[in-house]
Image: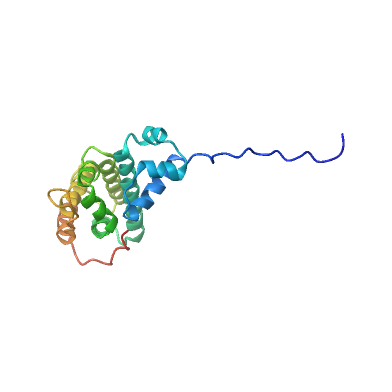
């Protein structure tokens, strides 16, 4: 025993730990918002994660794009629900209208749909993918909240209503070819109001800035 402190253990230099699944989605969202192509090779190089790992997590580049779009949608919905006032059908209409207007004004979404129409049709417009499933779930959750408080009684089951609301948004927000964001939000508000059983009324506010 010398009474001297033990020397610090040196860490061998090397590559930093690889990124997590969440890190990959966050980096891909940043590229999407910057109107850049979500390039898996570039993401892997930036984050220090292997392509095999990324494809294991997401299945394909379009799987990653679906997660990006779903995450963007979840954020927009969360903001719209925090901003909404009132109760029942009118609150729901304001939430959905806010969401619709944010996406109609999104430069990032418009750029994606215009530059990658095939990928957009398979991710944004498809009824079988992650984006559709998350959107329907988000609509259903918003409706269920109003049902639980007793402020709203839907005329059809919540799942059917949520599916119809999501499909209406797709039909009014995108052109028939799925190659551009049409953004027919005023008529969409009227139809959603009829589906919810309320008056479209005046819009209460402008939506937050779109990316």
Residue at 41% in and 48% down: 26
Q: Quadrant of the N terminus?
A: top right
Residue at 35% in and 52% down: 75
Residue at 21% in and 52% down: 114
- Residue lying furthest right in this view? 2
Q: Position of residue 211 (x, y in %)?
A: 32, 58
Q: In the rendered image, which quarter is residue 4 located in? A: top right
Colouring chosen for the image of the structure: rainbow
Relative depth, front residue between 93 and 175 = 175
Relative to residue 39, is residue 179 drawn left or right?
left
Q: Position of residue 62 (x, y in %)?
A: 29, 40
Residue at 29% in and 58% down: 87
- Residue lying furthest left in this view? 176
Q: Position of residue 48 (x, y in %)?
A: 47, 41
Above or below, 83 against 4 in this view is below
- Count all numbered tags in the image, as a single digit: 0
Q: Position of residue 152 (x, y in %)?
A: 25, 52
Relative to residue 40, is residue 93 drawn left or right?
left
Above or below, 97 against 130 in this view is below
Relative depth, front residue between 73 and 211 = 211
Q: In the rendered image, which quarter is residue 188 located in? A: bottom left
């Amino acid at each position: 025993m010398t009474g001297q402190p033990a020397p610090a253990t040196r860490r061998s230099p090397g590559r930093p730990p690889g990124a997590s699944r969440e890190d990959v989605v966050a980096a891909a969202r940043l590229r999407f918002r910057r109107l850049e192509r979500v390039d898996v090779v570039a993401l892997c190089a930036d984050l220090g994660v292997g392509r095999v790992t990324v494809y294991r997590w997401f299945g394909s580049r379009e799987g990653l794009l679906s997660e990006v779009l779903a995450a963007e949608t979840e954020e927009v919905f969360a903001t719209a629900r925090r901003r909404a006032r009132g109760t029942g059908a009118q609150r729901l209409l304001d939430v959905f209208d806010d969401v619709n207007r944010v996406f109609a004004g999104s430069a990032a979404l418009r750029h994606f749909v215009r530059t990658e129409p095939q990928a957009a049709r398979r991710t944004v417009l498809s009824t079988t993918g992650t984006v559709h499933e998350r959107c329907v779930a988000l609509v259903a959750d918003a409706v269920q909240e109003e049902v639980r408080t007793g402020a709203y009684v839907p005329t059809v089951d919540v799942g059917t209503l949520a599916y119809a609301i999501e499909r209406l948004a797709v039909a009014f927000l995108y052109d028939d070819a799925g190659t551009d964001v049409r953004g027919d939000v005023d008529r969409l508000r009227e139809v959603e109001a009829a589906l919810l059983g309320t008056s479209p009324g005046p819009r209460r506010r402008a939506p937050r800035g779109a990316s």
